């Protein structure tokens, strides 16, 4: 059975998808944009955007009863691979060892003209 997860501390889904879905002890967090859920603002630089994406992910993890330590995989989408270093530094400040698996892609365009989007999978320990 699947459970839909919604946190009021993360941006609302703006399409036909859920913030996250939990099934069989696994939480699938939809790609999070760097949107501040309080005022809809988006940081200008890649570091601020990465941090906001991760805050949104953490709000959803918390709402579902998971933590950063439960994250097993992240997918990072960048609008420009030249932003990889700054994104990676902000990302490294969010997780601790053992780090989750991760993949990073450059894509042609992201919603709202943002620089980064991050999706996450977490598993109950």
Image (cartoon, rainbow, N blue to C red):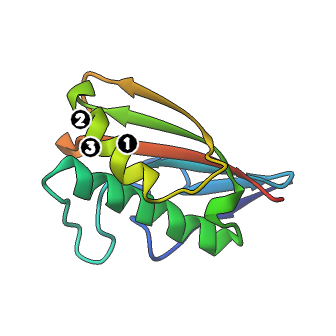
Q: For label 1, count other residues whose C-alpha is less than 10 Å away and answer few (under 14), some (14-19) or many (20+).
A: some
Secondary structure of the residue carrying tag 2 is helix
Q: Which residue occupies 57% across, 57% down?
A: 96
- Circles 2 and 1, Cβ within 8 Å, touching? The answer is no
- Circles 1 and 3, Cβ within 8 Å, touching? The answer is yes
Q: In the rendered image of this protein, does residue 2 appear above or below residue 82?
A: below
User: Along the horizontal axis of the image, is 95 left or right of 122?
Assistant: left
Give the camera-side residue of 113 and 53: 53
User: Along the horizontal axis of the image, is 103 left or right of 81?
Assistant: right
Image quadrant for the C terminus? Answer: bottom right
Residue 88: mark: 1
Q: Which residue occupies 65% across, 67% down?
A: 67
Q: For label 2, count other residues whose C-alpha is less than 10 Å away and answer few (under 14), some (14-19) or many (20+).
A: some
Q: Position of residue 36 (x, y in %)?
A: 29, 68
User: Along the horizontal axis of the image, is 29 left or right of 40?
Assistant: right
Secondary structure of the residue carrying tag 3 is helix
Q: For label 3, count other residues whose C-alpha is less than 10 Å away and answer few (under 14), some (14-19) or many (20+).
A: some
Q: Position of residue 111 (x, y in %)?
A: 27, 40
**Separation of disc 2 and disc 3 at Cα?**
6 Å
- Circles 2 and 3, Cβ within 8 Å, touching? The answer is yes
Q: Which residue occupies 25% across, 31% down?
A: 79
Image quadrant for the N terminus? Answer: bottom right
Residue 86: mark: 3
Toward which corner of the image does residue 81 lie, by quadrant? top left
Determine if residue 33 is in view: no
Q: Which residue bears the numbered disc 2? A: 83
């Amino acid at each position: 059975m699947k459970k839909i997860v919604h946190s009021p501390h993360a941006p609302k889904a703006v399409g036909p998808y859920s913030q996250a879905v939990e099934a069989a002890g696994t939480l699938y967090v939809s790609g999070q944009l760097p949107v501040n859920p309080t005022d809809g603002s988006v940081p200008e630089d890649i570091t601020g955007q990465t941090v906001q994406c991760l805050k949104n992910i953490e709000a959803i993890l918390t709402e579902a009863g998971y933590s950063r330590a439960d994250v097993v995989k992240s997918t990072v989408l960048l609008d420009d691979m030249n932003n990889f270093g700054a994104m990676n530094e902000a990302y490294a400040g969010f997780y601790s060892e053992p780090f989750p698996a991760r993949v990073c892609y450059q894509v042609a365009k992201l919603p709202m003209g943002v620089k980064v989007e991050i999706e996450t999978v977490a598993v109950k320990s």
